[in-house]
Image (cartoon, rainbow, N blue to C red):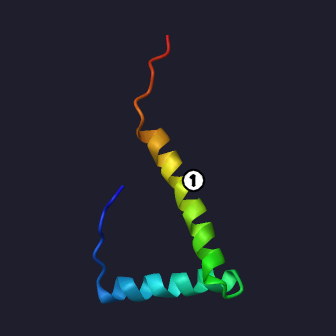
């Protein structure tokens, strides 16, 4: 899961704008926003793991 991503200045600005909107949705509470993002990422990771898991053959 450890993967470092390098962003250019345009991507960094876009990410900052999205983060600002996400924090605004949580009435400026960055800790609350971070907690929700962690939960959302965990759900997404579980779905990705399920998709990449080998499927059992059904007969």
Q: Residue at x 49, y 39 (%)?
A: 50
Query: Label 1 belongs to which residue?
Result: 43
Relative to 33, does residue 21 appear above or below in the rendering? below
Which of the image's four quarters has the N terminus?
bottom left
The residue at the far front in this view is 31
Q: Residue at x 52, y 47 (%)?
A: 46
Give the structural element (helix, strand or loop) at label 1: helix
Residue 53 location (% of width, % of height)? 42, 35
Q: Quadrant of residue 34?
A: bottom right
Residue 43 location (% of width, % of height)? 57, 53
Total labels: the figure holds 1
Relative to 49, does residue 10 appear above or below in the rendering? below
Q: Is residue 3 left or right of residue 52?
A: left
Binning the other alpha carbons within 10 Å of mark 1 as few (below 14), some (14 to 19) or many (20 upward) gives: few
The residue at the far right in this view is 27
Residue 29 location (% of width, % of height)? 66, 84
Relative to 43, does residue 36 appear above or below in the rendering? below
Q: Residue at x 61, y 69 (%)?
A: 35
Relative to 13, does residue 59 appear above or below in the rendering? above
């Amino acid at each position: 899961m450890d993967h470092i991503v390098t962003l250019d200045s345009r991507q960094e600005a876009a990410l900052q704008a999205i983060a600002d909107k996400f924090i605004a949705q949580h009435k400026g509470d960055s800790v609350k926003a971070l907690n929700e993002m962690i939960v959302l990422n965990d759900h997404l990771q579980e779905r990705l793991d399920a998709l990449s898991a080998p499927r059992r053959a059904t007969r």
